[in-house]
Image (tube, rainbow, N blue to C red):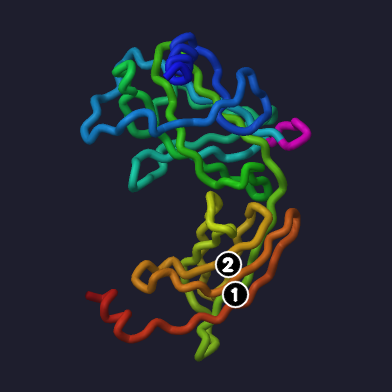
Amino acid sequence: MKERLGLAAAFAAGACLTLSGAGCRSAPSHPGSPGESAPDADPPSASVGTAAVLTGCMNDESGRPVPDVRIVLFAGFATRWRVAETRTDARGRYEFNPMNYGSLIRDESSGRWDYFVGIQIEHATWVSADGRSWWDLTVSSAPGAVTRFDLTLIPGGAVEGVVRDADAGAPRSVDLRLYLQPPGDFLRYATTDERGAFRQSALFPGRYVADLNEPGLEYPVIGEFDVRAGQTTRVDWAVASPPADADSAEAD
């Protein structure tokens, strides 16, 4: 309880709070805890007096800024959708000011309605050093509050290849899920083109499983591959055609 009260006091005082990673840090690191507030099915609109700022920076492990990192915000709880994005500048800094994006979530202790957002970063070569591809964040709407979200970035790797039909050998247009092993917090999606080809960059180094993004087929696994920093892994996968009854079920 003391920890929660201290966190609320810091927000009320307009303190900068670093929620993850390192970099341009001005306060001790503290894990985000969106579960401390409960979403409401019909929250009120944000008031005109709401003052919320979300800011931070992206640095490499040596503390050098990483420019042109896209920071994307998502609203919603079970279903998510993009609501805003920006990019880091030459100093590796970004800012949403005023921060009025995301879903409203009630802080039970104060009765205040804060912003709840999902965050992803996108870059051609860099990934977060914590091995995650998604973060949930509560952004305080207390007057004068500044919420800070920093990340340390490391070089990622890439995968590219072709997906073909196992019987005919023809290219297959499919949606893929690529997830780090053991199953955790890093997941990327990819789609093959008319040639059956795909490429996905900025993957956290490690062992991956690829499956078809087909809930009706229970996400069949089609391959595994390794990702190394600064390198591109090539794959060639064959995919069996779905059974006829599965096609009928999907049509229905």
Residue 105, percent from left and from top: 33, 29
Q: Position of residue 139 (x, y in %)?
A: 44, 26
Question: Which residue appears farthest toward the right when viewing the image?
Answer: 62
| Local secondary structure at mark 2 | strand
Q: Residue at x 51, y 84 (%)?
A: 165
Nearer to us in this view, 2 or 211: 2
Image point 55% across, 76% down: which residue?
163
Per the image, is 160 magenta? Answer: no
Residue ID for mark 1: 162
Nearest the viewer among 15 and 195 is 15
Question: Quick check: 79 above or below 221?
Answer: above
Please tell me how crowded label 1 is: few (under 14), some (14-19), or many (20+) other residues with Cα within 10 Å.
some
Residue carrying label 2: 198
Residue at 54 percent across and 38 percent down: it is 71
Which span of residues is magenta-colored? Answer: 60-66
Quadrant for residue 75, please give it: top left
Q: Nearer the viewer, residue 72 or 38?
A: 38
Q: Secondary structure at mark 1?
A: strand
Mark 2, residues whose alpha carbon is within 10 Å: few (<14), some, or many (≥20)?
A: many
Image height of 218 relative to 247, above or below: above
Q: Tell me, yes or no, whether the two marked residues, 1 and 2, touch with CB atoms within 8 Å.
A: yes
| Residue for point 71% across, 44% down | 154
Q: Looking at the image, tell me whether mark 1 or mark 2 is earlier in sequence order.
A: 1
From this view, report whether residue 157 is shown above or below residue 245: above
Q: Identify which amino acid the numbered label 1 is placed on.
A: Val
The reply to whether residue 89 is in sight is no
Q: Main secondary structure of the magenta part?
A: loop
Q: Amino acid at mark 2?
A: Phe
The residue lying furthest to the front in this view is 1
Q: Is residue 63 magenta?
A: yes
